[in-house]
Amino acid sequence: MSGKDLNLLRHSLIAVWWLTIVTSLVEWNGQSLTLLQAGGIQSVPLAHSLIAAGVALDLLLALLLMFWPRRISYQVSMAAVIALTLTASVLSPNLWLHPLQPLGKNLPILAILHILARRSS
């Protein structure tokens, strides 16, 4: 795989995290809140805190991949994706059956991160 291909993979993940940040903020009181409430989190302040924490994590991951694309950055990203996928699976296991696969998309993301981690220093 060429350096250009790896760069394309890295930039596609950066885009995913930026889009997730924007969506979480735009849907602060919409789908983001509804998703957590469907998972059993009824406290709006707690849900907003969790959304904010998710935005902060996504921002950290996007910035790491943008400005410090190293093996450790990819490994941290992989750990975050796994932790978030497991958490979402516990809160809303029905997301695995959603036609747009909000959790299933994490499998190719993990594969891309694995490739990038293997190919970096």
Image (tube, rainbow, N blue to C red):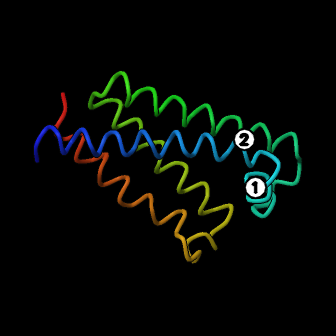
Q: What crowding class fits label 1: few (fewer than 14 Cα within 10 Å), some (14-19), or many (20 or more)?
A: many
The residue carrying mark 2 is 50
Mark 2 lies on a secondary structure that is: helix
Which residue is located at x 72 percent, y 41 percent? 50
Using residue 20 as the reference point, say whether residue 9 is left or right of it. Answer: left
Residue occupying the point 82% across, 48% down: 29
Image x and y of residue 43, in percent: 89, 48
Residue in the picture at 68% in, 61% down: 91
- Residue type at tag 1: Leu
Q: Which mark is residue 26?
A: none
Q: Which residue is mark 1?
A: 36
Q: Callout 1: helix, strand or loop?
A: helix
Where residue 111 appears, x then y in whole percent?
30, 55
| 65, above or below 98, in the image | above
**Residue 92 figure quarter:** bottom right
Going from N to C along the chain, the mark reached first, 2 or 1, is 1
